[in-house]
């Protein structure tokens, strides 16, 4: 009967498709990718809140070192790195198992931290010893150091162009360093007390967040010069650039707000109220949500970038800081 033949044919086709997919999975080891997580360092409770950014829910809390501040998550690897400012060390976190796998002594007071895309190299800013330590994460050891300006804070890496950018808070400068030669190429004067840095996806524009002058210096990295300065809220701390490079989001600690900057025509286009003393900030890969860590009330504000509204607030740990690239 025709219906039976069609049914038998359909079953045969479905079986072949299923068998083909099974074979491909077995050969390649492909599995569905886990959702991206946000890792929030809680400096006063000495732990890390892990947030599933697909559900906006906390899924785990991990014990960290003494006063965790900075966080750097590798984008193509399986590691996150945490700087413990009073422990004088960094932790290596396996982002698959959510377990701390190693601890590396760096001395001084590690604050800012950054990693290349695969997590093989880690750069740590030492607040008191005015240097950058370069770590081979596979060997879990310091392989080099670079002397920089006074009180280095925020650092960002441009993997494609082999550049490292360092904000020297007490020098009012930003340094551009060649990661291959480890030589300082340029020193740029910015506003007062630069702290956080944010780099555009193409690496052409760097934003220096200047705490005490309450503004953001816009730097053309190809010219190594400040091209404009944007006044923001009181005591700005960190910034992040949207994946399409059209917007910059800045945390303002003393205003409890986020300034939204039009990056094409540098100006403030919106101001968003968040929690108490916002510090760390990052954005999801699709650009739909901005995550803000609020130091004062130990929370994370999740902002919908379509309407600039806080969609959800999560209670994290004490002194939520998340200084660095914290979303994988």
Image: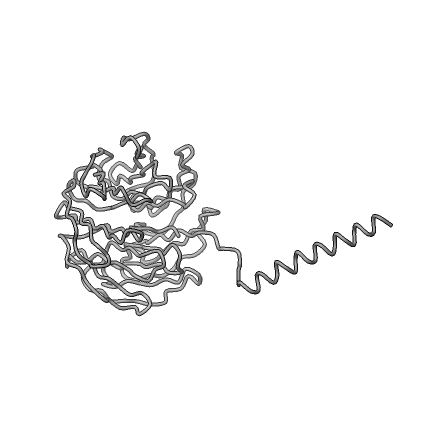
- Whether residue 264 is visible, yes or no, is yes
Q: Quadrant of residue 218?
A: top left
Q: State the residue lying farthest toward the right.
A: 1
Above or below, 241 against 183 in this view is above
Q: Position of residue 199 (x, y in %)?
A: 29, 45
Q: Position of residue 134 (x, y in %)?
A: 24, 62
Q: In which quarter of the image is residue 190?
A: top left
Please name whichever residue, 170 or 321, is drawn nearer the observer in this view of the structure: 170
Q: Residue at x 41, y 54 (%)?
A: 50
* Structure colour scheme: one colour
Q: Position of residue 189 (x, y in %)?
A: 14, 43
Q: Position of residue 325 (x, y in %)?
A: 33, 51
Please name whichever residue, 197 or 290, is drawn nearer the observer in this view of the structure: 197
Horizontal relation, residue 91 to residue 153: left or right: right
Q: How many tags in the picture?
A: 0
Q: State the residue lying farthest toward the bottom.
A: 139
Q: Residue at x 31, y 55 (%)?
A: 71
Q: Which residue is drawn at 42% across and 61% down?
A: 98
Q: Quadrant of residue 125?
A: bottom left
- Whether residue 319 is visible, yes or no, is no
Please name whichever residue, 96 or 265, is drawn nearer the observer in this view of the structure: 265
Q: Residue at x 42, y 37 (%)?
A: 304
């Amino acid at each position: 009967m025709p219906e039976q033949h069609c049914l038998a044919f359909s079953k045969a086709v479905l079986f072949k498709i299923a068998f083909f997919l099974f074979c491909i999975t077995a050969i390649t080891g492909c599995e569905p990718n886990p959702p991206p997580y946000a890792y929030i360092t809680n400096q006063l409770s000495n732990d890390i809140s892990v947030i599933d950014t697909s559900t906006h829910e906390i899924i785990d809390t991990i014990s960290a070192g003494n006063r965790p501040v900075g966080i750097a998550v590798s984008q193509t690897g399986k590691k996150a790195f945490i700087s413990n400012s009073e422990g004088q060390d960094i932790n290596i976190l396996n982002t698959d198992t959510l377990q701390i796998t190693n601890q590396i002594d760096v001395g001084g007071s590690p604050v800012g931290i950054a990693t290349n895309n695969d997590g093989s190299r880690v750069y740590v800013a030492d607040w008191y010893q005015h240097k950058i330590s370069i770590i081979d994460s596979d060997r879990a050891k310091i392989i080099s150091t670079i002397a920089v300006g006074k009180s280095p804070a925020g650092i960002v890496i441009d993997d494609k162009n082999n550049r490292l950018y360092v904000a020297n808070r007490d020098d009012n400068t930003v340094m551009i360093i060649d990661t291959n030669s480890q030589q300082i190429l340029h020193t740029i004067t910015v506003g007062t007390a630069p702290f956080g840095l944010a780099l555009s996806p193409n690496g052409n524009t760097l934003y220096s967040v200047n705490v005490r002058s309450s503004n953001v210096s816009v730097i053309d990295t190809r010219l190594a010069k400040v091209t404009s300065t944007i006044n923001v809220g009181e005591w700005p701390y960190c910034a992040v650039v949207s994946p399409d490079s059209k917007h910059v989001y800045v945390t303002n600690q003393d205003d409890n707000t986020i300034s939204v900057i039009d990056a094409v025509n540098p100006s403030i286009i919106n101001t968003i109220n968040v929690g108490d003393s916002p510090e760390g900030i990052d954005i999801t890969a699709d650009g739909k949500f901005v995550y803000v860590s609020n130091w004062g009330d130990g929370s994370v504000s999740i902002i919908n970038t379509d309407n600039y509204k806080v969609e959800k607030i999560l209670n994290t740990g004490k002194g939520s800081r998340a200084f660095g690239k914290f979303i994988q």
